[in-house]
Amino acid sequence: MPKVTYETFDPLAAAERALNYLTGMVDRACDCLPYWLVAPHENPAFARHCRVDDAELVASWYEAISAVRAMLGTEEGADVQAGFRRHLMRSWGAHGLRFHQPYPWSNTLHSSFHEMAYVLSALNRVLGGDPQDRAAERRAAGLVRGLRSLVVDRKVRTFWSGDFPEPEPIYEFPNDVYLADGGFDLTRHTGRGEQAIRNGMMLHALVVRAERAGDGAALDLAAGLANHLLGVSRYFNRRMEFFGHVHSAVWVASGLVRLGRVAGERRYVEKGRGVYDYVRSLSSSFGWVPEYAQWHPMTEEHCETCCIKDMIECAVELIDAGHDDVWDDLVRFSRNQLVENQLRSGRFVAVDNTVPDTPETTWRDLDRRVVGGFSGGAEPNSISLSRFRSVAGCCVGTAPQALQLVWDRSVTRRGRRLTVNVPVERAGPDAEVACGYPNDGRIAVTPRRKSDVAVRTYPWMGRALRAFVGGRPRLPRREGGLVVFRGVPRGVTVELRHPLRTRKVAEAARGRTFVVHWRGPDVVDMTPRGAPLRLWQRVAGRPKRYPRAPKVRTSGTGFVAAPTQQKG
């Protein structure tokens, strides 16, 4: 046993913190409209509305709060989730597109095609919970058909050597923005660039829609967009490397893998795996994923938590397509950088509750409300508060979905076989699972009814595995990457044990070398240590060494003195 006790991976605690943010960082005067822009480093801290609050956020936050409430089995937050749904179902217009509402901070009313990825994904989740929801079904079906009506259908390749009919559908949108009062105006653009990949972010949601609703138009649109991305867009090279936005590309990769499985086309699966492997080559073993590929020097990159969610979701799709080798990534990414990127304390936040809120900005209780948020720009060893998006509304919408993906896959049942895929403590309807990580190498499973129990094994378990049934040694039976116990009676505990020691591994991440302290699947420390919000403080019972908030000094006019920068 180690001399110190380390914190264990606790997805439910992370979900509770996320629920705090999702229910607290909303504007109840605007029917729970989210705040995307949060500035925890300002003195005093504030949150402010911007256009994206009523665009992708009402969709992604609906999915996030649905995910954590399902994990926790709680009624808390039901009113906020209902508010997100009401926002989601408003402001629909031409071609079945959803437009943001004309708030004072919104400017030009338009629909952005990458935002429709979030909107369709949220509608899929609404219908997953209630397939009889006619309003959501009407909007989802209308959105798919409206999007299909707006694409350019590339039918013929006209080249110097002649005209050649395209053998497969190739679809692309003429622009990345559609104006509510003017449609496609080619003098307007989002300015993001990478139009093909950002417009293609809807690929995964389209395939989910096609699979669940039997929607042929969604499958046709997905195939046409995929063919454009993989062909004439020239976005990816032959090794599926790219230059640009990782969140967009990996979300597309998830869609490619799912499209390949649903359509029975392995080539799409292989291309999606290629994108995954390329981004994996840029990422760390503990889940630090760069926001961009080949755009900045790697030493200037930060980890947008959305990208970790995409890698976890793509790993899930690859597993469903038969790629069991990515289970290890799913485990390491989720229990390390994903949860490290979440704020657990607001003690560093300077608050002045004497400043009155306005329709656009709130200053109230930001130290409490910021807890549970996720970083949009973490370094491997720290969260930088001075960087824009140190806490990002987009990441708060996606990271909880990753938590649910891992939670739902941690224990699965197929017929008589109960499989423990992820070493995490949980008591569910099928089994009670107890784990020792990162303090000792142990997984114990007690089925609720007679079952064949399988436990997935990982490289960090080593070769000295010992198996026990009801406390008695048993020779492990291996089936591929599983250890299987046949016919385990209800209430009898099966257990895997193995030696566990701390391994210190030097690893390059973000263009520099870190010494990573591993215990099984968990990072328990890292050097050099970061500031101001140092990560990897995993000794149980020891408070995080976050900097304290500067004292807010106000005059009668409400002036707030600027703080000196503090280090953790």
Image (cartoon, rainbow, N blue to C red):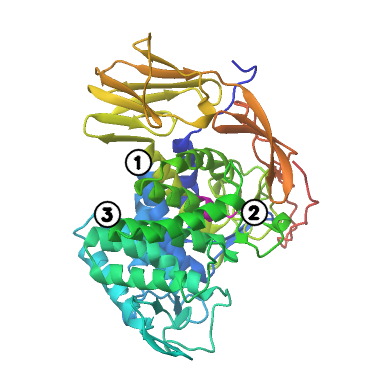
Which residue is found at the position 52% from the left and 55% from the top? 306
Tell me the residue that label 1 is attached to: 74
Whether residues under marks 1 and 3 lie with C-beta atoms below 8 angstroms apart, the answer is no
Q: Residue 506: x percent and y percent?
A: 70, 37
Going from N to C along the chain, the mark reached first, 1 or 3, is: 1
Going from N to C along the chain, the mark reached first, 2 or 3, is: 2
Q: In which quarter of the image is residue 47?
A: bottom right
Q: Looking at the image, can residue 258 be seen? A: yes
Identify the element where label 1 is drawn.
Answer: loop
328 left or right of 1? left
- The relative height of residue 84 versus residue 66 in the rendered view (above or below) is below
Q: Quadrant of residue 230?
A: bottom left
Mark 1 residue type:
Thr
Q: Residue furthest left?
A: 132
Which residue is found at the position 65% from the left and 63% from the top? 294
Q: In which quarter of the image is the N terminus?
A: top right
Mark 3 residue type:
Gly
Which residue is found at the position 33% from the left and 31% from the top? 419
Whether residues under marks 2 and 3 lie with C-beta atoms below 8 angstroms apart, the answer is no
Mark 1 or 3, closer to the camera: 3
Q: Residue 547: x percent and y percent?
A: 72, 42
Tell me the residue that label 2 is attached to: 40
Region rendered in magenta: 302-308
Q: Nearer the viewer, residue 396 or 446?
A: 446
Tell me the residue that label 3 is attached to: 128
